[in-house]
Structure formats: C-alpha cells, structure tokens
Amino acid sequence: MIAMSTPPPPASPAPGSAEEGLAAMERLRKRVEAAVAEIERLRTENAALSERVEALAAHGNAGEATQGLALEGDPDTLREQVEGFIEAIDRMLAVPSASDDESASESAG
C-alpha cells in the first residue's frame, strides 16, 4: 500500500522579491474590493433610509414614527456616539467607488 502525504506548503517569497510584491498587491486589492463593496452597501442603505425619511416627512408622520424612539443615557455621550457615526459615514462616502473611477476614466479618455 502506498502512503499518501500532503505536499509541503509553498515556500514564502524572498523578502523584497517580485513575488512578495505581487502577493502584497493581491492582499491590498482584496482589501480595497471589500472596502468598495461595503461603501456601496452603505450608500444603498443610506439612499433607502433617505427615501424613507422623505416619505415620512411628506406624510406628516415623522413625529409619529419617532415617538417609539427613546434614547437613554448621558446626552453628551449620545451626542459623541452619533457624531462618531456621522464622521465614519462621511469618511466612507468620501472614498470614490469603483464605478466612479470607471466613469471618470471613460470621460477622460
């Protein structure tokens, strides 16, 4: 009977080699793609929430919709949390999406 063994793991690329650079670029590309996907998801969610707020305002139900919303805790802490959320969303929205990059390169060419 022949014993099967697993092949050895691939050797790590030598520091400073082209292979190491390509591996680093691939990791970076995957991270950028994940960030772009998350930004697009947040933009879609933001647009849906914006439409919901507009619909509530148009129907005059905005006050009724928020009656069940109770914020508990220190007002200064809540304000800091909300401002932190706003800053995080602003940072994400400031990064151009892949579709924005494509349309910019098409219009330039």
Image (cartoon, rainbow, N blue to C red):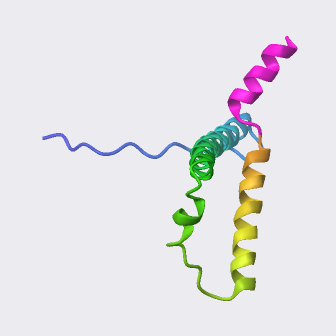
Residue 66: x %, y % from top left: 56, 67
Q: Is residue 67 above or below residue 15?
A: below
Image coordinates of residue 63 in percent, x first then y, are: 59, 65
Picture quadrant where residue 13 is located:
top right
Which residue reaches farthest bottom?
Answer: 74
Q: What stretch is highlighted in magenta?
A: 96-109
Residue 2 in sight in this render: yes
Whether residue 43 appears in magenta in the rendering, the answer is no
Q: Give 75 or 87, whichever is nearer the viewer.
A: 75
State which quadrant residue 30 falls in. Answer: top right
In the image, 30: left or right of 93? Answer: left
Image coordinates of residue 102 in percent, x first then y, are 73, 22
Identify the residue at image location x=25%, y=42%.
4
In front here: 33 or 10?
33
Q: Residue at x 83, y 15 (%)?
A: 107
Numbered-mark total = 0
Visible in this render: residue 12? Answer: no
Question: Residue at coordinates 74% horizontally, 29% vertically from top-left?
Answer: 100
Q: Where is residue 28 in the image (x, y as percent from the top left)?
A: 68, 43
Q: Quadrant of the C terminus?
A: top right
Q: Nearer the viewer, residue 89 or 101?
A: 89
Relative side of 32 to 67, left or right:
right
Residue 91, above or below 14? below
Would you say residue 101 sits in the magenta stretch? yes
* Residue extending farthest left: 1
Q: From this viewpoint, which residue is outermost toward the right?
A: 108
Q: Nearer the viewer, residue 89 or 62?
A: 62
Residue at screen point 69% across, 27% down: 99
